[in-house]
Image: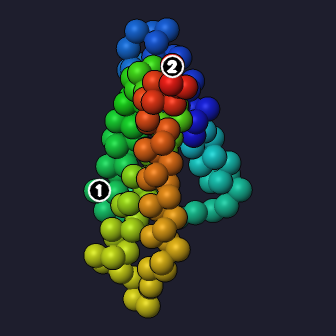
Amino acid sequence: MPVQTAMNGRIGAAAGTPVTPVLTNFLAAAVGLGAATAVHRAVTAPPPWTWPGPPWLWAGGLLGAVVVGASAVLARSIGVLQISLGLVIGMLLGGLAIDLLVPAPGAVVAPLTVVGTLLTLVGLAVASWPEKAWADPP
């Protein structure tokens, strides 16, 4: 993920727009998934093509475009480390919220899960601390 974020930032900076890395990512994904689907359909005899799942599941593609575009813009200003930590802490907090608000049957949120999530949040705070604060006093 950090390598992709860094490359998206470079592509966006070179192109002058975050649209280029978004299109590059989705073109590569479409070619890769198309090739994998073609191989799978050639090897197996699946039933006729149908659209899987309810339509709202396809919103992930649109959200992915937003994430790629935002990372291309933010890589230049806040850096790849902070973007990566921000994405990870977002996923951890989202997963923890789902586990607490709508738990799966029999699921238990372990204290270490909460501690690990909080430690990741502390890591993001430390990585986001201004560089001047880490400099030696005069």
Image quarter of the N terminus: top right
- Tell me the residue at 29%/56% (across/down): 55
Contact between labelled residues 1 and 2, with CB atoms less than 8 Å apart: no
Residue 27 shows in this picture: no
Which of the marked residues, 2 or 1, is nearer the chain's N terminus? 1
| Marks 2/1: CA–CA distance | 60 Å
Which x, y percent locates residue 57? Answer: 34, 57
Q: Is residue 113 above or below residue 122?
A: below
Q: Is residue 21 above or below residue 45?
A: above
Amino acid at circle 1: Pro
How was this image coloured? rainbow
Residue projecting furthest to the front: 138
Q: Residues within 10 Å of mark 1 (few under 14, many from 20)?
A: few
Which x, y percent locates residue 80? Answer: 52, 31
- Tell me the residue at 33%/76% (across/down): 100
Residue projecting furthest to the right: 43
| SS at circle 2 | loop
Instruction: Using the rendered view, name the quadrant where residue 56 is placed.
Output: bottom left
Q: Which residue is mark 1?
A: 55
| SS at circle 1 | helix
128 or 131, nearer to the observer: 131
Amino acid at circle 2: Pro
102 or 53, nearer to the observer: 102
Q: Which residue is mark 2?
A: 138
Residue 39 shows in this picture: yes
Q: Nearer the viewer, mark 2 or mark 1?
A: 2
Instruction: Using the rendered view, name the quadrant where residue 6 is placed.
Output: top right
- Tell me the residue at 51%/30% (across/down): 134
- Tell me the residue at 38%/14% (across/down): 17
Which x, y percent locates residue 85? Answer: 49, 44
